[in-house]
């Protein structure tokens, strides 16, 4: 059984990889497949090309764990369109879909939320409060009543974001420990996210 992880992955980082590994272990999935967004419907700051984002994901995860499905679909890359295609390819079985707590609670603002409700089983990664506690089950009652299929996995993962990495690269800071060595090298070789005029040579 497979699970899908959607995102811009701009760039992919160790937090993404750790979430996928722990979801796979805890929920018993055979594989987590990353789906880089081809053309996001909303503006993303400092968005690297699709080719670069796809290649970085493949470098970090192996090509067999990365899908280029959105490259072959209509744009903009609304999630529901990709889900419809995956659902069809999966013999009309619900698609397992990793989603963060904050995005899960915005689902009804997404394009065609009824399609998402019908065709997705959500694997929700909750946000921790400052005291380390996670949001209680009562917060999910609304989506249960609405008929969404989901489960909540309480996992810890590296507190890093793609925007943090982009900002650090632009300022010339070292991003070791935030993404894989190979992705770090790819970013450097292809001069991604760099502000050359203000680039520093050391932290």
Image: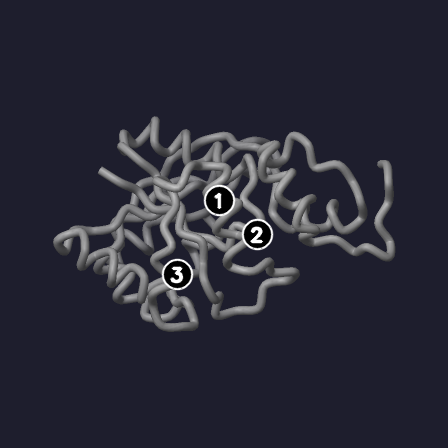
Q: Residue at x 54, y 37 (%)?
A: 15
For disc 1, the marked residue is 57
Question: Disc 3 or disc 1, which is closer to the eye?
Answer: 1
The Cα atoms of the two marked residues, 1 and 2, are separated by 9 Å
Q: Residue furthest top?
A: 25
Q: Nearer the viewer, mark 1 or mark 2?
A: 1
- Name the spot of residue 27 as percent of width and height, x first: 30, 32
Is residue 138 visible in this depiction of the protein?
no
Residue wearing tag 3:
107
Disc number placed over residue 44 in the picture, else none: none
122 lies above or below 40? above
- Residue 10: numbered disc: 2
Relative to 57, residue 158 above or below: above
- Residue 86 relative to residue 12: left or right: left
- SS state under label 2: loop
10 Å crowding of disc 2: few (<14), some (14-19), many (20+): many
Residue 98 image point, x, y percent? 38, 45
Q: In which image quadrant can residue 153 be found?
A: top left
Q: Earlier in the sequence, mark 3 or mark 1?
A: 1
Q: Residues within 10 Å of mark 1 (few under 14, many from 20)?
A: many
**Residue 84 visible in the current orientation:** yes
The numbered mark, 1 or 2, whose residue comes first in the sequence reads: 2
Is 8 in front, or is 56? 56
Contact (Cβ within 8 Å) of mark 3 with mark 1: no
Q: CA–CA distance between discs 3 and 1?
A: 25 Å
Q: Residue furthest left?
A: 91
Report, in whole angstroms, how far the alpha carbon at label 3 lies from the one at label 2. 22 Å
Residue at 61% over, 32% down: 181
Q: Nearer the viewer, mark 3 or mark 2?
A: 2
Which quadrant, please, contains the C terminus?
top right
Helix, strand or loop at mark 1:
helix
Could you say whether the residue bearing mark 3 is in a helix, strand or loop? helix
């Amino acid at each position: 059984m497979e699970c899908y992880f959607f995102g811009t992955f701009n760039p992919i980082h160790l937090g993404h990889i750790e979430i996928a590994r722990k979801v796979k272990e805890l929920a018993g999935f055979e594989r987590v497949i990353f789906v880089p967004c081809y053309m996001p419907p909303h503006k993303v700051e400092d968005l690297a090309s699709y080719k670069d984002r796809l290649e970085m994901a493949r470098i970090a995860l192996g090509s067999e764990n990365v899908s280029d499905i959105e490259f072959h679909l209509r744009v903009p890359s609304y999630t529901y369109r990709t889900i419809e295609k995956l659902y069809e390819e999966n013999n009309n079985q619900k698609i397992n879909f990793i989603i963060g707590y904050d995005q899960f609670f915005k689902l009804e603002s997404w394009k065609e939320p009824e399609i998402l409700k019908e065709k997705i089983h959500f694997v929700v990664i909750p946000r921790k409060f400052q005291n380390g506690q996670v949001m209680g089950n009562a917060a999910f009652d609304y989506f249960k009543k609405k008929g969404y299929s989901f489960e909540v996995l309480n996992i810890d993962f590296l507190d890093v974001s793609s925007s943090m990495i982009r900002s650090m690269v632009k300022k010339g800071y070292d991003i070791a420990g935030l993404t894989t060595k190979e992705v770090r090298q790819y970013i450097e070789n292809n001069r991604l996210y760099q502000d050359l005029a203000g680039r520093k040579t050391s932290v």
